[in-house]
Image (cartoon, rainbow, N blue to C red):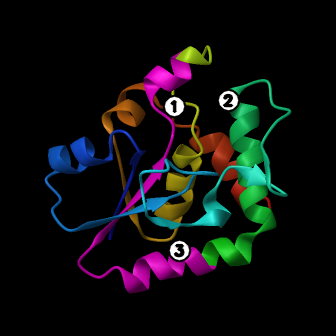
Amino acid sequence: MKVVLTSFSKCFSTMHKLGIAGWTSISVARWMPKNMNMQVIQPFAPQAYGRKLTGFHSVDEYYELYMNTLLSRRQEVMRHIENLIQNFGNSTPVLCCWCTIEQQRRKGYNTIMCHTIPLAWILRQHGLEPLFDDDRIQYGIDYDDVIKTSYNSA
C-alpha cells in the first residue's frame, strides 16, 4: 500500500504529479493550517510530552531524537500504522507536515530536515510503500543507518 509524505502546501501538486486520484490528507504535524480540516495522527508528530523537539545540533541528532520519541509511544504508533493498512482501502493516505525546502532554507538548512523521512523508514518496515514529494526526493537525506540503529536497538 502506498503512503505519500509531503507538505501541506505541496499536497495537491504532489498528488497530481504522482497521478493518484483517490487520497485522504492526514496531518502528522504538531498543528495544521487553519483553513484545512483533516484527520491528525498525533503520535507521529515531532514532539515529546506536548513540546517541540529541541536539544539537537545536527540532522543525525534530530532523527535519533525523533526515533526515540516514536519508540517511547510504540504501541500508539503501531495502532496508527495498522489503521493506515486496514482502513484506507482504495484511498491513498497522504501524510502532511509543514516542511518544504523553502521553509528549511529560512531556518538555515540546505536539506529537508523533516520527521517524515524517518517516519517513512518505519512505514517501510511495516510493509507500506512511502512516496515522497519533490522536496524530499531532491533535498532529503536518507539516514537509514542512524534510523535503523535507533529503531532496532529498542
CB within 8 Å, label 1 to label 2: yes
Residue under circle 1? 141
Give the image location of residue 125, x and y in percent: 52, 64
Nearer to me, 28 or 76: 28
Instruction: Indicate the amino acid at tag 3.
Output: Ile
Check disc 3 and report its element: helix, strand or loop: helix
Dot 3 crowding, Cα within 10 Å, few <14, some 14–19, many 20+: some
User: Which disc number belongs to residue 59?
Assistant: 2
Label 1: element kind = loop
Of label 1 and label 2, which has the lower sequence position?
A: 2
Q: Amino acid at mark 1?
A: Ile
Residue in front for this viewpoint, 106 or 84: 106
Q: Tell me the quarter of the image containing the N terminus.
A: bottom left
Position of the C terminus by quadrant: bottom right
85 is higher (above) or lower (below) than 47: below
Q: Which residues are magenta?
A: 79-105
In magenta segment, residue 94: yes
Q: CA distance from mark 2 to mark 3?
A: 25 Å
Q: Nearer the viewer, residue 122 or 88?
A: 88
The residue that disc 3 covers is: 81
In this rendering, the answer to whether 130 lies above or below 117 is below
Q: Are marks 1 and 3 in contact (CB under 8 Å)?
A: no
Left or right? Give the position of 90 relative to 102: left
